Amino acid sequence: MAGSHRSGTRAGRWLLIGVTVLFFAVFLFAPLVVVFSSALQKGFGYCLAALADPETVAAVRLTLLTTCIAVPVNTLFGLCAGWAIAKYEFPGKSLLKTVIALPFSVSPVIAGLMFVLVYGSGGWIGPWLEAHHIRVIFAVPGIILTTLFVTLPLAAHELIAVLEAQGREEEEAAWTLGATGRQIFCKITLPKIKWGLFYGVILSTARTMGEFGAVSVVSGHIRGLTNTLPLHIEVLYNQYDTVAAFSAATLLALIALATLAAKAALERRTERRRDRPAPAQATSGREEWTWA
Amino acid sequence: MAGGPKGRILLPGFGMTLGVTVFYVCVMILIPFAVLVLKTASLNLHGFYETVTAPRVMAALRLSLLTALMAACINVVFGVPAAWVLSRYSFPGKRLLDAVVDLPFALPTAVAGIALTSMFGPAGGPGAILERFGVRVAFTPVGIVVALAFIGLPFVVRTLQPVIESLDRRVEEAAATLGASPAQVFFRVILPPLVPAVLSGFSLAFARGVGEYGSVVFISGNMPMRTEIAPVVIMTKLQQFDYAGAAAVAVVLLIVSLVVMSLVRLIELRAGFWRTGVR
Amino acid sequence: MGVTLRSVWKTYKRTAVLQDVDLDLPTGKLVALLGPSGSGKTTLLRILAGLEVPDHGAVLFDGEDVTRRPPGVRRAGMVFQHYALFGHMTVFDNVAFGLRVLPLKNRPLPWEIDTKVRELIHRVRLDALESRYPSQLSGGQQQRVALARALAVDPRILLLDEPFAALDAKVRVELRRWLREFQRELGITTVFVTHDQEEATDIADLVVVVNQGRIEQVGSPSEIYERPASAFVFEFIGRSNVLPLNAREGKWAHDLLSRVLPDSVSSSETVRAYVRPHEIDVHRLRDRGTAVKAVVERVHPHGAVVRLVAREAGGEHRWEAEISRDRYEALKVNIGDTVYLEFRSVTIFTPHRKVVHSWTLDPVREEFQQPQRG
């Protein structure tokens, strides 16, 4: 590596590239290949049949339901948080940002545990819920709540970053021209952040569908009822029904790949924009993993 | 529309958006945290100590911390060159490599878990090869390290990449014109501004590894005292309805990750100092 | 429209950005808010726009209190420093924005908007570019779009934040002359912020000099230059030589000053004394006893004038003198030559008493005299 600065030796450079490619091949590509090859080892038809299993379908349905609730809610929250944090100065702002990022540094199992402690039968408001015949833990509401918690910072983090990068001059300009709050948001802010928003939604979707640890704690693993897709994969895998497990896993892997593609496309877009002599552009994509 | 701090007219929407944000954060984050802490407090200090120092819990905590540490080290060893290659060199397939760095982040942990287990299990390709050399991966601590290294990779690479990209190459050229050898340029000019980012990526990967569950449970085998990680212990306690015990272990893990995260914050603050000269 | 600021205060994080600002801007004038960065001039502009509210004090538009009225309602057209054009809209849509967001009952019909926007785009000479996006325009073109956009809503006052700062030197001069003419045609009271004294004195009817959150002076460009109200204004507008003063030892360090200073200025006072470079005469021989002997160190030809930098003989102080090229050629001075500098006029500020003395050399009596002031 020593000789690899700009004019460094070609050998060093290709050595580094080689090591990286090899490492990525073993560590990142191989697992992906395993997912798809294991799913298809008994043929495409078998894979499809495994997916058509009623319990798998039920799991997919529950996962979709969770996603359809959690993603919009967290996206709306992200828009609110992004607007408040990026457009105004107020005391406690950095504390708020830290708190929003908190779910990132919490083990998913602990996240699940916290919701059991709040809503479970021995928990904080559990008895009250029980008295009113509302089941949260070991039921669908619990799954949705914990998923909301775990994926809360994803869209918010992306939207805060994008909105902060935009600054507020254009909004102020619109305001001096007499636009109302809603007009400013819909006509100025939204078009500017739409790609960041889009990416935030995709990322949230992938993570929401794939959430495992936290949901595992609160679901109760009732097959066909409270098993989400990742939980169902676990069940199938532990029953040594490998093909079925990997068939279900391909669905989630495809969504993960879509996320990566969206991110790459978004980055290309911002890069191309950065090359043009344009007024301040949003920086997006790159830094969203470096939260905390 | 007015309102807000110091009688400033603000763009409209401040009260509404901040109100929603604070409310949601309170309900979704602060209350669950508070309840967790209160539950642990119900144990009293002695009970807390007893729970946490039980041999099975201690073994799990030690295993979680050690494997996360090892995995973070591996991430630095491979992640630093990878970040360098991805930000400095151009070669065919670079975009693909760059995109796939985020795979561990986007791929559901359960999927990663079963894929790694199949790969490194006795029946899998790499697993069989390693077994021939006497290295067992699946159902041993080695497997846990492998899974955690997979999960932690993006943290190191993605933390480092923007910093490497922001390095001003003219500084390297300046150093070279002043007579520095390539090695000197690397160790004296390039490396120092990268150190905070490396540390910060390392810490992030470590913190993530300590709490990781989904990708590990399949490959670890979860044998008490040997390959049982701390999150699995919490899970077990929960299944036995030992809520206070689970909360106690959770608090220990939380403290670890919060300390690490504060460290990251500190490093980043100092790095901001450093980097101003470089940008 | 006339604008009045009445004892305006503004504080950020315990720093007073504006302190007790009173200002009257007459209708139809082009006003420059001139000051160094951090002087509070941009905050002043944002308060006029309604983007900030003063902590105390009032903003009046034609006598009507608009202090707490949001920007769109008070109809203050603003051109932002980096123009803040809407990057996702064409030039046309940018200009039309203010009309399209009007409440339905006040909104013109689409064809009326079309006509008005076309006319504005024509007036700022961007006809061919109406379907371009801001990123496809040059800085000067972007600025004119921003101007047209601000004008579309028939503002009562036009505000421009450092309008020329982001432009190339050549475009800058062209564009500011154009703005001058344009503003005269429109007749709208216009306020622009600048840190460039040349820009301010070149086009403004009225210059407001701001320093450390206070207004130092308000006046026409010539008033500001000829009768600066404070040492700050003197130094900020045009070039100047500072006379070395040392009052601590009880006497003026410069023997010249000790001879010419009036008895009314006591040597214990904080006094600042200046000479403009063009008020220094350069001679090869000593004519008068008040002349300062100096050695020429540098010669800068500057168009019709030549600037000489000369170091005082036996001292470290450097003087800058500005003489005409004819004079320079007659003198035939070179670097290293000894010259004699004569001050035609010395301006003295005693800040605590806020008294300004301007002393002119009486060529007959060889004494400095305070001129009659009008």
Image: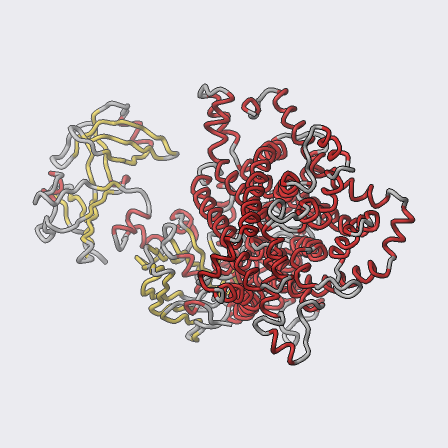
Residue most toward the right? A45
Q: Position of residue B250 (x, y in %)?
A: 55, 57
Q: For residue C16, what is the image quadrant?
A: bottom left
Q: Position of residue B266 (x, y in %)?
A: 44, 47
Q: How is the image coloured?
A: secondary structure
Query: Where does the C terminus of chain C fall, quadrant-wise?
Result: bottom left
Q: Position of residue B262 (x, y in %)?
A: 47, 50
Nearer to the camera, A80 or A63: A63
Asked whether the viewer can see residue C320, the reply is yes
Q: For residue B153, what is the image quadrant?
A: top right
Left or right of C343 in this view: B93: right
Nearer to the camera, C110 or A21: A21
For the point 67% across and 49% down, the residue is B217
Left or right of B182 in this view: B146: right
For the point 71% across and 64% down, the residue is A220
Q: Residue B173, relative to residue C79: is it above or below?
A: above
Residue most toward the bottom? A132
Left or right of B199 in this view: A107: right
Nearer to the camera, C140 or C262: C140
Asked whether the viewer can see residue C140, the reply is no
Q: How many marks?
A: 0
Q: Position of residue B238 (x, y in %)?
A: 62, 61
